[in-house]
Image: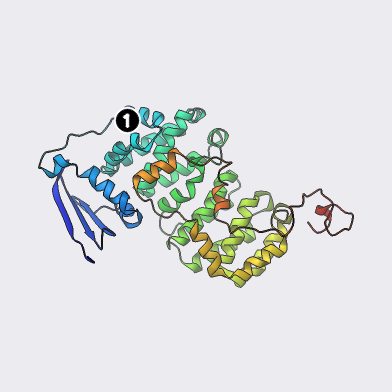
Amino acid sequence: MKDVFVCFSDKIMSKTFFIIALDDISCFHFQLGRDLDYRHAKMFHSGSISDKLHYIMRVLPQKTLSGQQPDSTMMNSEELQKLFQAAAEPEELLSSFEDLLASPEETAKFVNQQLDLFATNPELLAEESGRKQLRCIFLLAGMLGRTEHFQPIFNLVCLPAFQEKVDKEDFLVTELSRIFGLLSPAHSLADLEAKTLDAAVPLPVTEQLALTIVFRWLAERDSDREFQATIQVLLEKLPPERVTYDLGMALIIDAIAVGGDLLRTQVMDFYQANRETLSSDLPEKNLKSFFDLGKQRVKTMLRGNYLGNYGGLPGELQRMLHQPTATEETTSVRKTLPPIVRDRPKVGRNDPCPCGSGKKYKHCCGR
């Protein structure tokens, strides 16, 4: 049936809870005493049907449908911290996360307290238990989607102690572009641009800021014109000593995706200025081939690796708890890039140049 309408109405924690399902459970609207704009709407916009049905069964247990009042199971801060530090599987966290997300005001305060705790005691990140705890806080912050958490998270990840104790492949780093993309305020592109150019910002965070700018564009939070102007500024102003291969490639692909030939001059100038960093893995002819793909195709490639808004809670907990290792998956920056196909084995900077000149590659065709 095309238009299925299901409505459950009952009292949960003294608030009226409605579920409205339209078009075969593809569109949901929630009201918990008032309209909600946090994780529920996001999950039911993009989550799988199985995730939706699973959530319904969790929030509407049989005793609630029969008119019984469910008991409150919300843990206190100390209990939550212990749970976050020890949990190894999504099932151990699911119920507590559901309770937390059902009380956004209190949970926002809890997230702020936890961010303050780690900012003042970054040594907690030296242990895996502390990092597991903070991963849960980051996921909660992302799912709540509150702009108030953007700056505290940014300040925390820029701390020297954070950079020292957290690997750049950790969820705490690779999830930043998604979190920043959702939590950064509207019309904050200029601020993100300034942060990306700030030499005091650690390079792993700079890379994630560049991905944040892409995230916002793909989420249509910023227009093509705004995004193109920002990418052009970064291409022109980012100094070579701040350009890693990942960051340089991301900016090049973004420029092609939004501007195509309109930004060809800026892209080629950027490539030449950072040739030593980029040319070994990105020969100039491969770079030119990206323009031949056309900006729409390159944008489609980027969108294929775009996670978007948070979906079903079981799946998000699984991603957080069982993050790929460095050997299983490259960095999140490289995931967003189209594959580079070489027509010959990679040449090292100090290897003889394959052109036969007798010079080292870096002093010949690799310049």
Apparent side of residue 188 relative to residue 236 in the rendered image (left or right)? left
Quarter of the figure with residue 270: bottom right
Q: How is the image coloured?
A: rainbow
Would you name the residue on which mark 1 appears?
77
Q: Which of 66/254 is in front?
A: 66
Amino acid at circle 1: Ser
Going 82% across and 49% down the picture, which residue do you hit? 351
Going 42% across and 55% down the picture, which residue do you hit? 308
Tell me if I can see residue 243 in this picture. Answer: no
User: How many numbered circles are shown?
Assistant: 1
Going 45% across and 28% down the picture, which residue do you hit? 129
Going 32% across and 28% down the picture, which residue do you hit? 79
Which quadrant holds the N terminus? bottom left
Q: Residue 339 in the image: x percent, y percent? A: 61, 58
Q: Residue 18 in the image: x percent, y percent? A: 18, 52
Mark 1 Cα-neighbour bin, 10 Å: few <14, some 14–19, many ≥20: few
Q: Residue 66 in the image: x percent, y percent? A: 10, 43
Q: Residue 333 in the image: x percent, y percent? A: 56, 51
Apparent side of residue 111 relative to residue 335 in the rendered image (left or right)? left
